Image (tube, grey):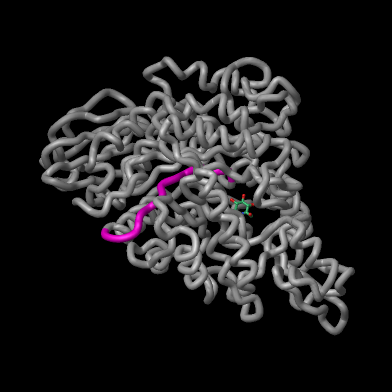
Amino acid sequence: MTRQTRWWMDRTAYQIYPRSFADSNGDGLGDIPGIIGRLDHLADLGIGLLWLSPVYRSPMADNGYDISDYRDIAPEYGTLADFDRLVAEAGRRDIGIIMDLVVNHSSDRHPWFLEARRDRDSPFHDFYYWRDPAPDGGPPDNRRAYFGGPVWTFVPEVGRYVFTLFSPQQPDLNWQNPALRRAVHDMMRWWLDRGVRGFRMDVIDLIGKDIDRDLIAEGPYLHGFLQEMHREVLAGRDVVTVGESWNVSRDTALLYCGRDRGELDMVFQFQHIVAGWDETHGKWRPRPLDLVAFKKVWADWQEALQDDGWNSLFLNNHDLPRSVSRYGDAGQWRERSAKALATAVHLMRGTPFVFQGEEIGMTNAGFTAITHYRDIELINMHREMLEQGLPEHQFLEGAGITARDNARTPMQWDAFPGAGFTTGDPWIAINPNHDRINVAAQRDDPGSVLAHYRRLIALRKRHEVIVHGRFVPCLEDHPQVWAYAREGNNRRLSVLCNISSDPARAEVPPGLAVRGTGLIATAGPRDAIAPGPILLEPWEAVAVLGAPG
Ligand code: NOJ
C-alpha cells in the first residue's frame, strides 16, 4: 500500500470563485479581503489546499479567464498587498494556495496583444497565432470557437486574422515562440516566490497545438512544453500542479502525471461529466444520469492510476452545474443526496476538490430567462443555438440544468438579504433559497451537509487506507447503488451508496463484506456490511472500516 507520499496527498482542496465568494466593500463583487475574512470557514472544514480562480487584472469578459496583467491583482478584487496577506493568513492555517494559471490565451487587452496588433514587425506579434485572410478576404478557414462564432478574429490594423479558440477577447498565445514560453516561466516563478504552493492550469491540453494541421487538443508539442515548464519552473520546488484537460483519456493520463514524466501531479479529467451530454447539442441538451456508465468512468480512472499518477476527485467547479441538482435530488432529499454523493467521491483514491457552496448543498440557480445569465459562453451560445434552430425554451431548459452560472451565484453565508455575501447589489442574482441553505444555519448542526463534509475531510487525514488503499469496484451493474472497497494492510474500507430517491436492494458480494467500525453514514449507523441481501434507504450511504468479511 505504501507509495511515495507527498505533502498534499491527504489534503482536501477547496475552490474559490472570487467574484462570488465574499464581498468586503459592498460593490457587489467578491474580493480578496472578503476571502481573508472567511478563511476560518475553510480551516474549520479541514481544507489544506485552496485553488483560487483567477484574481489577476482582467477586463472580465470571462470573469478573469482573460488576463491583461499576469503580475497584478484586479483592482475590484484588491491589491498585491491584499494577496500577500491572503497567502500569509492561509499559511497560518496550513492552507496552501494554488493559483489559476491561464496561459493558453491572454486578454485582448494585454499589452502583449496591444503591441501584437499594432505592428506586424513587433516582437510581440509572434506571441499570438496570425494568418492572412483567404483570397476572398474572409477567415482562413471555417473552424468554430468554443464559445461560438468563428475561431478567427480579424484585426484591421495588421490586416490579418488572429486565432481565438474561446472568444475574440481571448486570443490564443503562441507557445511555439520560445520568448512567450520564457515570459510564462518567469511569471510562474514570480508567483511561487510570493509563496503560492502550486498551480491549476487552465485548458493546459491546448497549449501544444499545431493549428495548421488542426491538432488542437493534446497537440504534438504538449508534453515537450510541460516537461520544459517542469524543468524551468517546478523542479526542486515542493509544489502541487493540476492540469485541466477536457480531452485527456485513460490512455493519455499518465503522459501528464506519471511519476517519472516530470510534468504535472494530477489532471482534471471530464469524462464523467461529458458522459451526460447530448451528441449534437452537448451540454445544452443534457441527459439524465446513467449511473452504471457514470460509475464505470470513475472506476476506470481509479484503476488506470492505481500504481502511478494521481486522481483528482470532483463533481463541481465553476464551469459545472451544482452536483446536488445535477446528480442528486435538490427537493425532498437535498441534504441526504448531497451527503451521499460526497461520500462516494471523497472515499476514492485521489485529491477531492470541493467547490464553494458544495459543502452546504447549494443548488442550481433556478434562472428561467436569458437576462438572468451573465456568462459569456452562455450568452454567445444562446445566439448560436437559436440560429441553428434550437427552440429557446429548450435552450433555457438545458441551461437551467447545466449552465456555468448555476455554480456562480453568490456563496450563501446566512439568511439575511445579501446572504452575508454583500451589502450591495450582487453582480448576479443570489439564490432565494439562501434563507434555508446557508453556512450559519449549518455550522453548529451535526446533522448538516457541512458537518458531513467536515467528517469526510477529517477521515482522509486519519485513515491511510483512504489515501493509498487499492480501489476495488463492486456491484458495477447495479443501476442505483455505487459501491467499492478500498484495501490495504489487511484492512478493508467498504463504501456503499444508494444514488437514488427510492429504496435499493442489493446483494453484497464477499469482496464488499466487512466487519468493524462505521466511519460515516447518511442514514442509521452500521458497523458491518454482511454478505448477502441488503436494503438501503433512499440516498443512504455508509462506509465501514475493518476486517474483510
Ligand atoms: C476553462 C475555465 O475553467 C473556464 O471557466 C474558462 O472559460 C475557459 N477555460 C477559458 O479560459
Please tell me which residue lies in front, 289 or 199: 199
Residue 98 rendering spot, x and y as whole percentages: 50, 45
Residue at 63% x, 35% y is 81
Q: Position of 71 compared to 445: left or right? A: right
Q: Position of 531 compared to 62: left or right? A: left
Quadrant holding the C terminus: top left
Image quarter for residue 215?
Answer: bottom right
Q: Is residue 389 visible?
A: no
Residue at 80% x, 64% y is 115
Residue at 23% x, 48% y is 469
Image quarter for residue 467?
Answer: top left
Please tell me which residue lies in front, 53 or 346: 53
Residue 94 rendering spot, x and y as whole percentages: 41, 34
Please tell me which residue lies in front, 163 or 382: 163
Magenta region, residue range: 307-318
Residue at 40% x, 43% y is 352
Q: Is residue 314 magenta?
A: yes
**Dominant SS type (magenta):** loop
Q: Residue furthest bottom?
A: 135
* 112 is higher (above) or lower (below) than 520: below
Q: Position of 227 compared to 292: left or right? A: right
Q: Is residue 529 magenta?
A: no
